[in-house]
């Protein structure tokens, strides 16, 4: 496994992203006038570490919630639309939402969630992703806040998995194992 982004670079960039996100919301009239918390919704399980680190660096008021989607198995890219298995628990009718995911790959996950969460006020759903496979993302799916652009390789660590493995690594690495889940670079 080859380290792509080490823990120090992750934290430095996440601190910058928190400043960008703070300044975006502090610049919004509704936030200045109401101080209403932003509902931060993390996509489980991949976004768990990114969300945990990001929200602790934000100075705006937040409420935290989660959603769970049907996922890829291993690194196979599904052709079907991902489905929402567990929707957020909060009342979202007139909430200002910040959606958090680990990676923007084909854009299907963010696309589905945006469509679901955007009703009835689409302008109030913003998205933050740690990583973006910039060669692959279709032009019509965009994230508002992006940590790093990465090449189109399978990455693990810092929440990202291969068949549920390696989420706990404190850095992002390029997966170099075979289909059995064995890491070739360690043998
Ligand atoms: P999308 O719907 O194709 O944009 O994919 C987003 C989801 O696929 C992410 O939330 C991840 O769970 C998963 N995913 C995509 N690429 C990778 C990767 O390189 N490593 C681990 N998970 C990935
Ligand atoms: Mg995911």
Image: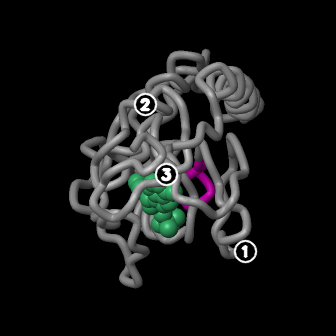
Residue 72, image quadrant: bottom left
How far from the left and from the top, in percent, is residue 178?
A: 38, 61
State left or right for residue 100 relative to residue 19.
left
- Mark 2 burial class by Cα count in 10 Å: few <14, some 14-19, many 20+: some
* Marks 1 and 2, how far apart at CA: 31 Å
Question: What stretch of residues is rendered in magenta?
Answer: 121-128
Looking at the image, which residue is at 33% across and 63% down? 74
* Marks 2 and 3, how far apart at CA: 12 Å
How far from the left and from the top, in percent, is residue 28?
A: 72, 35
On the image, numbered disc 2 is attached to which residue?
Answer: 169
Quadrant for the C terminus in the image: top left
Residue 179, image quadrant: bottom left
On the image, numbered disc 3 is attached to which residue?
Answer: 175
Comparing labels 2 and 3, the label whose residue is closer to the camera: 3
Check the image and report above or below for 183 versus 107. above
At numbered mark 2, what does the secondary structure look like: helix, strand or loop?
loop
């Amino acid at each position: 496994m080859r380290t792509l982004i080490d823990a120090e670079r992750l934290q430095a960039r996440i601190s910058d992203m928190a400043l960008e996100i703070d300044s975006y919301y502090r610049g919004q009239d509704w936030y200045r006038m109401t101080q209403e918390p932003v509902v931060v919704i993390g996509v489980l399980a991949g976004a768990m570490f990114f969300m945990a680190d990001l929200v602790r660096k934000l100075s705006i008021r937040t409420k935290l919630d989660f959603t769970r989607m049907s996922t890829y198995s291993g690194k196979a890219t599904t052709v079907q639309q991902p489905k929402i298995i567990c929707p957020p628990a909060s009342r979202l009718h007139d909430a200002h939402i910040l959606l958090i995911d680990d990676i923007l790959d084909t854009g299907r996950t963010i696309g589905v969630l945006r469509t679901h969460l955007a009703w009835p006020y689409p302008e109030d759903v913003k998205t933050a992703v740690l990583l973006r496979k910039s060669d692959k993302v279709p032009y019509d799916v965009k994230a508002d806040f992006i940590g790093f652009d990465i090449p189109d390789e399978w990455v693990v660590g810092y929440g990202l998995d291969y068949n549920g493995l390696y989420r706990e690594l404190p850095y992002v690495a390029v997966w170099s194992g075979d289909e059995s889940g064995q890491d070739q670079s360690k043998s």
